């Protein structure tokens, strides 16, 4: 009886070891094979450009989809054709809010000497002057209605 029990135990142990070996991934092969007729890539994927941020002052209002940003490193052209423009509090604004003298921060991809912006943050907007002087008229003043509302 002891012989049968030891035989069953050794058989069960060998099944556990073989099961554990089956779970391990196969070791990688030496080198990668390229299918016949497929050209090998020589330099890897094409470079998309260098990403970066540029801070400065807007030199002039945008002409078309570009404007010039004056930075510590000199004037830099910023393309805003695909950019989202935000004000200092993070709200989206139209690109016509980019005015000369406004401090701005542009983030995007450099291609040559142009920064193709993904986002432009206007760090401070110039105060806009009201279109005209508001006068009294029928709605003017801070007067509240004096009549009582029906119940």
Image (cartoon, rainbow, N blue to C red):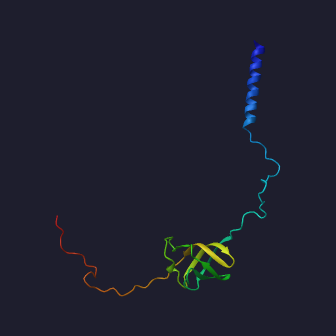
Return the x and y of residue 145 as percentages of the image width and height.
22, 75
Q: Residue furthest right?
A: 30
Return the x and y of residue 81 as percentages of the image width and height.
57, 75
Residue 102, by quadrant, is bottom right
Closest to the observer, 102 or 22:
22
Q: Residue at x 67, y 74 (%)?
A: 110
Q: Residue at x 73, y 34 (%)?
A: 20
Closest to the observer, 39 or 118:
39
Residue 117, by quadrant, is bottom right
Q: Residue furthest top?
A: 1
Q: Residue furthest front?
A: 37
On screen, 25 above or below 102?
above
Residue 56, by quadrant, is bottom right
On screen, 6 above or below 56?
above
Q: Residue at x 26, y 85 (%)?
A: 137
Q: Residue furthest left?
A: 150
Number of numbered tags placed on the structure image: 0
Closest to the observer, 88 or 14:
14
Return the x and y of residue 55 as percentages of the image width and height.
61, 77
| Quarter of the figure that contains the C terminus | bottom left
Q: Residue at x 77, y 19 (%)?
A: 7
On screen, 40 above or below 21?
below
Return the x and y of residue 44 as percentages of the image width and height.
75, 63
């Amino acid at each position: 009886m002891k012989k049968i029990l030891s035989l069953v135990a050794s058989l069960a142990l060998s099944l556990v070891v073989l099961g554990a070996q089956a779970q391990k991934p196969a070791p990688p092969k030496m080198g990668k094979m390229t299918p016949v007729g497929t050209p090998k890539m020589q330099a890897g994927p094409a470079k998309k450009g260098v990403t970066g941020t540029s801070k400065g002052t807007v030199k002039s209002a945008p002409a078309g989809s570009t404007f010039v940003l004056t930075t510590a490193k000199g004037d830099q052209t910023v393309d805003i054709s695909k950019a989202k423009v935000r004000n200092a509090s993070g709200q989206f604004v139209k690109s016509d809010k980019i005015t000369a003298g406004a401090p701005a921060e542009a983030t995007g991809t450099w291609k040559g000497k142009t920064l193709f912006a993904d986002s432009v943050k206007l760090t401070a907007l110039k105060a806009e002057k009201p279109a005209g002087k508001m006068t009294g008229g029928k709605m003017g003043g801070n007067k509240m209605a004096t009549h009582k509302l029906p119940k």
